[in-house]
Image (tube, rainbow, N blue to C red):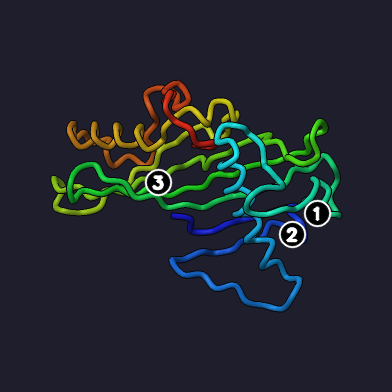
Amino acid sequence: MLKAIIVKNFKCFKEETVFPLGQLTLLTGINGRGKSTMLQSLLLMRQSIEHNENGGQLVLNGSCVNLGGFNEIRNSNVSREESIIFKYLYEDIGELTENNPFKIVGYAQYSFEENYQDDMVAQISRIEFDDDIIVEYFDKVDSNIYNSIRYKIDSVYPKSVQSKFDFERIVYKYISDSLKEKETTISSPCLRPRYPMSARPNPTAQRVGG
């Protein structure tokens, strides 16, 4: 579930601007303060994924919204070298076994730059994840309490790599192993994967950005 959207250099938002989200979110305010712009950032991502999940581009004109060329979506006060930033704070719920859920908390940040061959799309130049991915899970073995594991991962992945691994599957494996082994390292403040996450590609994954 999305917990917040952060935009920067997008239309009227030159500085990093945070929009908290809940199960029900109301947008209010006078005209020209960015309500429509926030919604457009979501619609842009939606139509881009629907157009081509592995394309690595932000489709500016499509079935959800039409915003013209790249210069129309980039803030007029930033240089051509600066990227447009969309950042998504998320909380994802999974389940190890029946009645044994886990929760993943972190963020994914997309940087877009101008495509000089096609002004109607923006190119994804970088996908960045939180340095620390916090995973909370309910451990029946340890007095029915929640445990929290902080996974330290490389914070930046090229888009060509990021679209190929299944993060949830890897998290499932590590938590499952920890529950089975019950080693003292389970409460360590920093657990590192035994191999780079990008080395475990999922050939069936179709989502840009994982």
Quarter assignment of residue 55: top right
- The three-letter amino acid code for the residue at tag 2 is Phe
For label 3, the residue is 134
Distance between the alpha carbons at the discs numbered 3 and 1:
33 Å
For label 1, the residue is 75
Q: Quick check: 15 above or below 80?
A: below
Q: Quick check: 110 above or below 34?
A: above
Where in the figure is residue 26, as x and y percent of width and height? 55, 73
For label 2, the residue is 13
Q: Residue at x 56, y 42 (%)?
A: 50
Answer with mark 1 or mark 2, whichever residue precedes in sequence: 2
Along the horizontal axis of the image, is 73 left or right of 203? right
Q: Quick check: 167 above or below 14?
A: above
Mark 2 surroundings within 10 Å by alpha-carbon count, few (fewer than 14), some (14 through 19), many (20 or more): many
Answer with mark 2 or mark 3, whichever residue precedes in sequence: 2
Mark 3 or 1: in front is: 1
Q: What secondary structure is found at the residue carrying circle 1?
A: loop
Q: Residue at x 21, y 48 (%)?
A: 100
Pick whichever, 78 or 57, lies toward us: 57
